[in-house]
Amino acid sequence: MSDSETLEQLRSAISDLPAPIYLRVKQGIISQIRSGSWLAHQRVPSETELVNALNVSRMTINRALRELTGEGWLVRMQGVGTFVAEQKGHTAMLEVGSIAEEITARGHHYRNQVVALEQVKADEKLAHAFSINVGEPLFYSQLVHYDNDMAVQLETRYVNPALAADYLQQDFRLETPHHYLSKVAPLTSGEHIVEAVLADESQQGLLEVTTNQPCLLIQRRTWHHSQVVTVARLLYPGSRYQLVGSFTGQ
């Protein structure tokens, strides 16, 4: 793609965005990358070209490019230029979404491996989380999710049998736990805890990471009205995935 075509795409992408100009430039560039219009390792127009094409100040363009570089969208090489970075997968930090849909939306191939699917008894910690008695039954599943055959999430999940009676009968190679639970017990509220951790030996083998490779962990509990539906631990290799969130000022 020529620089003129690249600039025309960007002008179109930012024209109607309701945001400050530097943020409109950022969002426009991100939209071009996410859509696949701007490919990994593709050269981005220079600051001068962007200033002239978008009719904005150099300070605005510099800020947008600097922040996009810091956030991992671009790579700036001194004396050479600015290029689209090889993108990590990403998941929305404050949303409960389907990892299968996230992966296929990027045009990648999704698959999973079901490691465990069984009934277990609630220990003290799980009993407290579900507001049930110690020893009561829970359903348990563990899956590895793959993006283009690369392990990107280890999902460990406990499920309330009262709200998903047929959970153990599902073929989660065809339909993810998230999709099934969204049908039988749609979430009405949830909570997240996010932290950086190191994987244990079993997790290292399933995610194909090394002993000292940092991981991102989301601990999630969701409700259907007044009842807890599921308690899940979602573990991501830090080098392959990132959590994304956004907010607006008041």
Image: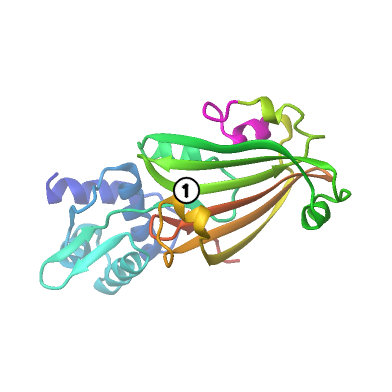
- Drawn side of residue 17 relative to residue 98, left or right: left
The quarter of the picture where residue 229 lies is: top right
- Drawn side of residue 82 relative to residue 187, left or right: left
Which residue: 52% across, 26% down? 174
Which residue: 58% across, 26% down? 171
Q: Is residue 180 in view from this perspective?
A: yes
Which residue: 18% across, 52% down? 42
Q: How many marks?
A: 1
User: Is residue 221 rendered magenta in the image?
Assistant: no
Q: Is residue 246 in view from this perspective?
A: no
User: Looking at the picture, how far across and down is residue 123, in whole percent?
Assistant: 79, 53
- The residue that label 1 is drawn on is 206
Helix, strand or loop at label 1? It is helix
- Drawn side of residue 145 relative to residue 250, left or right: left
User: Looking at the picture, how far across and down is residue 109, in whole percent?
Assistant: 37, 34
Residues shaded magenta: 171-183
User: Looking at the picture, how far across and down is residue 236, in whole percent?
Assistant: 48, 54
Check the picture and name the quadrant holding the C terminus.
bottom right
